[in-house]
Image (spheres, rainbow, N blue to C red):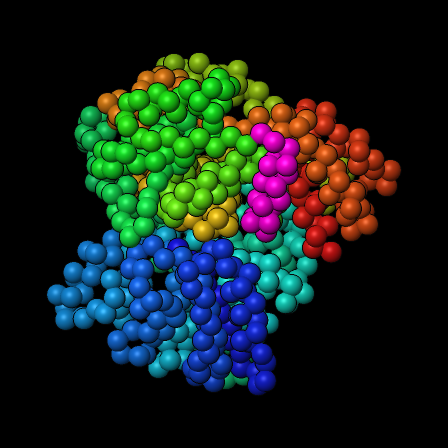
Amino acid sequence: MCGISGATTLRRGQDLVSLVQAIAEAQTARGPDALVVERFQAGDAEVVLGHNRLSIIDLSVEANQPMNDASGRFTIVFNGEIYNYLELRKQLEADGVQFHTASDTEVLIEAYRAWGKAALEKFYGMFAFALLDRLEGELLLVRDRFGVKPLYYWTDGATLAFASTTGTIARWAGLEPNLAYVARGLRFKYYEDETDISPHKGLKALEGGTWLAVKLRGDRLALEQGRYYDVADRVQAERAKIEGLSFQELEARLLSLLDDASSIRLRADVPVGVSLSGGVDSTTIAAITARKHPRIVGYSFAHPDVPESEGPLVKELVDATGVQPRYVWPTAPAEIEDLFWRTYRAQEAPFPHASMMAQNAVFRAARQDGVKVLLGGQAGDEAFMGYRKFYLFYAQSILRQKRWGEGPHLALAMAPFALAIAKRAGVFWSERARYAQGGTGMASRLRLPAEVEASGAGMSAGQTPLDRQVLDITRYSLPSLLRYEDRNSLSNSVESRLPFIDHRVVEFGLALQERHKLANGFGKWILRSAIKDLVPDSIRLNRDKRGFDVNQARWIEGGLGRVLREALTERRKQIVDYLPSDANLEALFSDAALISDPQAFKEAVSLIWLGDQA
């Protein structure tokens, strides 16, 4: 995993080398092992490509980038991993391709030379890359199926710049903050979506599962965009494959998919660990990987002697699997303040909760130990209906389609936490009113665009629970979760690998019937049932939703609240347009307000970020 950057122009005399060098230097943490910037000519354009390398597979300098193919036609800069590169390499070697490195980068570029865009569907992995075709005079930008790896670009028609991060291009191009992006995060807790929205106006995020071809001829860059992957289209084919299988056969297929997805993500020439949150998803991955690496290290934001942390649950998994625990538990005010600012700088955009700080701390601990790769459990909730809201969508679907025969199953499945679901629905509508135009909330001055206000308010007519799962994966929750994961891991020079986001696992999860995922008072029921011989029941059958557990109130009282207020006060002139005329920052963001109001932390971080963009 690395950082990529680049720029191209049809103008004469524009200094792109300095721009790409600045981007690459700002992205050093993403790839501290090598930084290379090279200039090329293709078509009528100058092209500059930059690469920051985090060496994971084939640590030799021969695997550095930019990398050329054997013919000299193509040059690539690549961020990510092609996990099935060994299998693809064998196919290419059988066709006569000779390799000069042991890297997955060379496999990627030779696969593209052999198969063209059809190669994209053969890749199992996470990737964002730029491929320069000097013969055709074309620069191709590509992002993986679900947008695990970031790729942003800006263009004014004659010049185009791209990068793994946003800040340097935004400053260079003089871009304003995107208030719709901030408003979306305040209202819905997620910022990114399936469109090209980014934190800055004019800076676009290449959508997951798509490519962008930039034609480098004439007096204006011609852009052509295409989609090579649509998860909704793949689900029907997967449903046909699993139709008629018993529940036990489905369990076996799920375990087989997760086993392979985890196995290929263990391929590395550096130490590998796992992240442990105490929840079902991360413990599943830890248990599976522990069978292959019996003493693999598990990093957890917890303390074994603090009952309200995840420590006791992690200890049970450790006892059951042999995973070696590494507990991360900062408590000193100076540690928390440092952690906030490191997370803030890493994210380059607002974030909604202190749990993102905990995630950052876990990756930092791994890096301090010399571990450059961590496997994690992200995306299990989206693929297997882990969120309680899916019960509401399931109920809506049954009522709308009059599938009365499923009513008893739903009632039994939903009963254990019906009150919690109702409470969450109340919070949803309360937040909606807070951020509506003309509302009384402090951040209502952001004036949410109508399309933001209208989106995400439940299931619309004709939607099914599957539709909502697809939206969660492509638009609602997962894109922002992937942003937090990517920035937190790479700011600490650690590669995060996520077996649940393997496209085969996602397609299987979406293809399952709702009754296989929602049952007995649990979401992700088939997963919980399948891992009964791997994970202790205290974790497997725990209904509490667990990420990285953070006692945010304790942190706020311990100094984090003061840090936020001081930062807001320092930026008051820059954020005055977003505040009520009589705003009292000390009162709006007092410790009591930050603790009692779940929106206040988000609002504070958003305002700090907006102040820094002025």
* Picture residue at 23% right of the left edge, 29% below the top: 251
Q: Residue at (86%, 41%) from the top-left corner?
A: 581
Of 245 and 497, nearer the camera is: 497
**Residue in the image at 59% along x and 85% along y:** 13
Q: Looking at the image, is 493 positioned above or below residue 598?
A: below
Magenta stretch holds residue 175 = no
* 112 lies above or below 328: below
Q: Characterize the magenta stretch by its predominant secondary structure.
A: helix
Q: Taking 303 as reference, is 268 above or below it?
A: below
Where does residue 563 sit, x and y in percent of width and height?
A: 70, 38
Q: Name the side, left or right, on which 413 lies relative to 306.
A: left
In this rendering, position of residue 68 left or right of residue 425: left
Taking depth in this image into account, of 77 and 302 the one nearest to the observer is 302
**Where 378 falls versus 11 (above or below)?**
above
| Quarter of the rendering containing residue 594 | top right
Q: Is residue 189 visible?
A: no
Would residue 591 be found to the left or right of residue 58 on screen? right
Instruction: Between residue 512 and residue 25, name the one nearer to us.
Output: 25
Residue 588 in percent (x, y) is at: 77, 32
Q: Is residue 342 magenta?
A: yes
Q: Which residues are magenta?
A: 331-348
Q: Nearer the viewer, residue 450 or 315?
A: 315
> Which residue lies most toward the left here?
94
Query: Where residue 51 appears, x then y in whole percent?
Result: 44, 66
